[in-house]
Image (cartoon, helix red, strand yellow):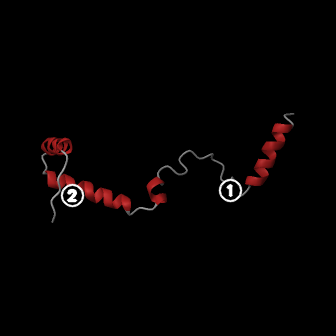
Amino acid sequence: MFSIRLPRELEDKLTAIAKQEGRSKADLVKEALVEYLSQREKSPFELGEDLFGRHGSGAGNLARDHERLLREKLHAQKDPH
């Protein structure tokens, strides 16, 4: 167990939210600390997992055929006909 001093503004916000939700300030602080610590334990991939592949091209061959696709694109730019 430990005590912590909060800046007045932060304590006022915490008090207001605790009152609004009908919970204790200690419960809110514990919940916030659990969330913070669980985020710190995640890998960078896990933290951004919901963003990766979100706007995919729909082409599943980009990694495998990247050189051929790049050559074709460059060739098309040089000779638009």
Q: Residue at x 27, y 59 (%)?
A: 34
| In front: label 2 or label 1 | 2
Between 8 and 52, which is closer to the camera in this rendering?
8
Q: Residues within 10 Å of mark 1 (few under 14, many from 20)?
A: few
Identify the secondary structure beneath mark 2: helix
Residue 49 on image: x %, y %: 48, 55
Residue 74 on image: x %, y %: 80, 43
Q: Residue at x 31, y 56 (%)?
A: 36
- Quarter of the image where one finds residue 9: top left
Q: Which residue is mark 2?
A: 30
Labels 2 and 1: the sequence-earlier one: 2
Tell me how far mark 2 sits from mark 1, CA to CA.
44 Å
Q: Residues within 10 Å of mark 2 (few under 14, many from 20)?
A: few
Q: Which residue is mark 1?
A: 63
Residue 61 on image: x %, y %: 69, 54
Residue 40 on image: x %, y %: 37, 60
Task: Classify the position of the C terminus by image quarter.
Answer: top right
Task: Classify the position of the N terminus by image quarter.
Answer: bottom left
